[in-house]
Image (cartoon, rainbow, N blue to C red):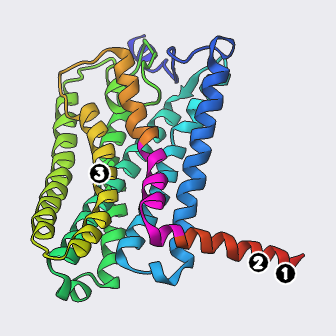
Amino acid sequence: MDKKNQTKVTEFYFPDFPQFEDGGLLLFILLLCVYLFIVVGNSMIFFAVQLDVRLHNPMYSFISIFSFLEICYTTVTIPKMLYNLVSKEKTISFIGCLLQMYFFHSFGVTESLILTIMAIDRYVAICNPLRYAIIITPKLCTQLSTGSFTLGFLMLLPEIVWMSTLPFCGPNQIHQLFCDLEPVLLLACTDTSMILIEDVIHAISILSCVSIITLSYLRIITVVLKIPSGESRQKAFSTCTAHITIFVLFFGSVSLMYLRFSITFQPLLEKIIALMFAVLAPFFNPIIYSLRNKDMKDAIKKMFCSQKIFTVHGS
């Protein structure tokens, strides 16, 4: 009987999504617009970098990879959130929940690693410009990118496999916008002290990336301030501003969510923080990289002009 009770939960329920007639439609339209902007905006950056030979350098290659990851990262959660806003069921299967957690955090870890690599790339470019081409080679970029994806998708695998073996016998309500590690672990009908170990693992990975990125940009700022030419100093700062903004947006919200250990927030604040790193950070990525970067704006314009010319000739 105990065994039967321990295996009866086959799906989880999201009770905090409003019903369709109680504001769900408005939120659905708003979130859908945000999601479409994320996909279209980041796709433009990705294809602009691929199609414009002027952007075929390490910095823009990493930006294009990051934009691709933003699309994948949001696609793991937002479509299901949209479904929950219009559906009366508002449920997700046990396997679906595990897969959502795995891919969401795997893409998130990979993004963290790419942001770290981007900071190191800017550090070498500004602090050691004469050796930049020797150090940051195309081969190294490929190795770093491949390594980021590999590590990102391997890091969460043991934790997800372990969670798949836990008994869930009720309740099955997840008070979050999507499946996340701690809210799901709290529903397990067994000892959940492993949550502390999970928190420590996340803290180490987050703090490692944050430390490397922070030290890199502190060193960059120190070097840039010593540049005698005001124009050169402005150009160097402009190059790094977008990276730093994305870094603060992404890691700021991630830190609030995963570096708090036993500290608890109000349920509404929990959801706002989740929206910050799951939706808002990817939303601002194309705005920051396209509006603050002349080369990127020119590449996007060139891409659309080329498409327009192709369409005219085709017709």
| Magenta region, residue range | 281-297
In the image, is 137 to the left or to the right of 66? left
Instruction: Tell me if residue 288 is in the magenta stretch.
Output: yes
Check disc 2 and report the residue beneath it. 309
Residue 247 shows which numbered tag? Answer: 3
**Circle 1 SS class:** helix
Residue that mark 1 sits on: 313
Q: Is residue 209 above or below residue 164?
A: below
Quarter holding the C terminus is bottom right
Q: Residues within 10 Å of mark 2 (few under 14, many from 20)?
A: few
Residue 259 located within the stretch drawn in magenta: no
Mark 3 and 2 residues: CB-CB less than 8 Å, in contact?
no
Q: CA distance from mark 3 to mark 2?
A: 37 Å
* Residue sitting farthest toward the right: 315
User: Who's the residue at 43% across and 12% down the image?
Assistant: 171
User: Looking at numbered disc 3 in the image, what kind of residue is underneath it?
Assistant: Phe
Q: Image height check: is 281 above or below 118?
A: above
Nearest-to-viewer mark from 1 and 3? 1
Residue at figure coordinates x 23%, y 20% from the top left: 191
Q: Image point 29% across, 85% down: which residue?
A: 137
Cβ atoms at labels 1 and 2 below 8 Å apart: yes
Q: Amino acid at mark 2?
A: Ile
Residue 176 on image: x %, y %: 43, 23
183, 18: nearer the viewer: 18
Q: Can residue 208 be seen at all in this image of the molecule?
A: yes
Q: Position of residue 86 (x, y in %)?
A: 67, 23
Say which amino acid is labelled 1.
His
Q: Could you tell me which residue is drawn at 42 percent across and 54 percent down?
A: 288
Residue 121 seen by the camera: no
Across and down, in percent, residue 229 comes to 18, 76
